[in-house]
Image (cartoon, rainbow, N blue to C red):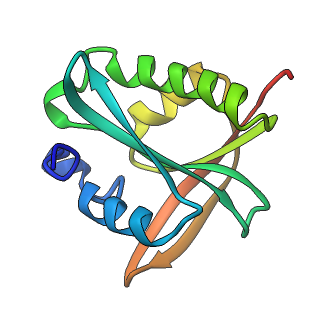
Amino acid sequence: MDCFLLKLDSNQENFVASSAQSLVESAYEDELNILGIYSEENMIGYLLYDYDKDIQGWSLSRFMIDYRYQGKGYGKEAAIKFLEYFKKNVGENKLHISIDLNNIPAQKMFKSLGFKEMKEIEYEYLGRSFKEIQMIKIFNI
């Protein structure tokens, strides 16, 4: 329920699928891995990662911090912890992410964590059009 109640600011709603959609998808698709992001006992966000057959690699498909907790460093801290977790537990040396072209703060944050821009893409999903920048992080293993 805590994840379901997470919200974005109204100008960010096109940046990432809702927590409700992510919870439903992860319940029915075994390859989707969803993790909560907490500050002490409070759930403040979530992320979803999976092996993407279309790109033949691992992807951080969703990354969301509730609007009430943004701008306080939680997103970057959570991303750093996830990258450590991914490297240790998944053991792959590459991780992909796609970020909405208008989500400049997320692009800057992931660039600061070592992600490199690959290319811009456009696609449709569930009747909506998206324009994103694909990025990749290569780990030293």
Q: Quadrant of the C terminus?
A: top right
Image coords of residue 89 (percent x, y): 68, 32
- Measuring 23% from the left and 32% from the top, which residue is drawn there? 43
* Residue at x 18% of width, y 53% of height: 4
Image x and y of residue 118, in percent: 73, 47
Q: Please, is residue 54 above or below residue 10 in the view?
A: below
Going by the image, does 68 lie left or right of 48? left
Judging depth in this view, the residue of 19 and 114 nearest the camera is 19
Q: Compare residues 102 and 89 and report the one nearer the observer.
A: 89
Residue closest to the far bottom: 127
How many marks can you see?
0
Q: Residue at x 24, y 26 (%)?
A: 70
The residue lying furthest to the right in this view is 141
80 to the left or right of 52? left
Q: Is residue 115 visible?
A: yes
Q: Quadrant of residue 77?
A: top left
Q: Residue at x 61, y 63 (%)?
A: 121
Q: Is residue 35 above or below residue 10?
A: above
Is residue 64 among what the camera can see? no
Q: Which image quarter: residue 9?
A: top left
Question: Does residue 13 sit above or below 128 in this rendering?
Answer: above
Percent across and percent down for residue 84 are 62, 21
